[in-house]
Image (tube, grey):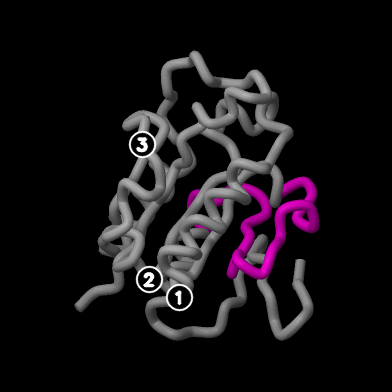
Amino acid sequence: MKPKILLLNPNWRYMEKVGRMSKMASGAPLELLYIAGSLQKLKIDFELMDLWSLDKKVQDYNAEILSAKIIVINTAPSYVYWRDGTIDCNLPKKIIKEVKGINPNAKIILIGPHGTVLPESIASRDTDYLIRGEPDLTVAKLIESIIQGRKINLPGVCYWKGFKFFI
């Protein structure tokens, strides 16, 4: 059985309390789509779950999350927001906790502007890998390395080793 890979875009409508993106129509999660293209080239099966466009919660997909081996989560709705967007990273942190509550064994890969600029601000023990910079090719190669059990030695990949976070 092939490991299940999920590319997860949070539902950014839940940031309404801080006045961002609540009334906006969802945009395509471009970084996840680019990763999807790279995974297809490597012949790695995946599922894209765009909770923002579906207006759903993590809990609506318990079965899918429970069966996932690797879950990629972004800290901004789309590349469009990487430069001029979500400063607050509480929603991605909340989503990571919810996902880990459903499936504590899933490897979490976090992408987005927060990890790129200030990885210390978003790193938690619930995140297995944090990507600095463009995730398009790196994440697919990281997933391939995890699946094949290879040592992770990719530029821009931050990770926990024991009690130390390596950036």
* Kind of residue at disc 1: Asn
User: Is 132 colored magenta in this rendering?
Assistant: yes
Where residue 88 appears, as percent x and y from the top left, is 71, 36
The residue beneath circle 3 is 56
The residue beneath circle 1 is 105
Q: Residue 153, located in which quarter of the rendered image? A: bottom right
Q: Secondary structure at mark 2?
A: strand
Q: Circle 1: is it few (<14), some (14-19), or many (20+) Cα within 10 Å?
A: some
Query: Are discs 1 and 2 less than 8 Å apart at CB?
Result: yes
User: Is 81 colored magenta in this rendering?
Assistant: no
Where residue 119 appears, as percent x and y from the top left, is 75, 55
The residue beneath circle 2 is 69
Q: Secondary structure at mark 1?
A: loop
* Kind of residue at disc 3: Lys
Residue at (70%, 45%) from the top-left corner? 114
Q: Which residues are magenta?
A: 116-138
Number of numbered discs overlaid on the protein picture: 3
Does 158 sit above or below residue 47?
below
Does 163 sit above or below residue 133?
below
**In terms of depth relative to the viewer, which is nearer, 16 or 68?**
16
For this view, does 139 lie left or right of residue 164?
A: left
Q: Circle 3: is it few (<14), some (14-19), or many (20+) Cα within 10 Å?
A: some
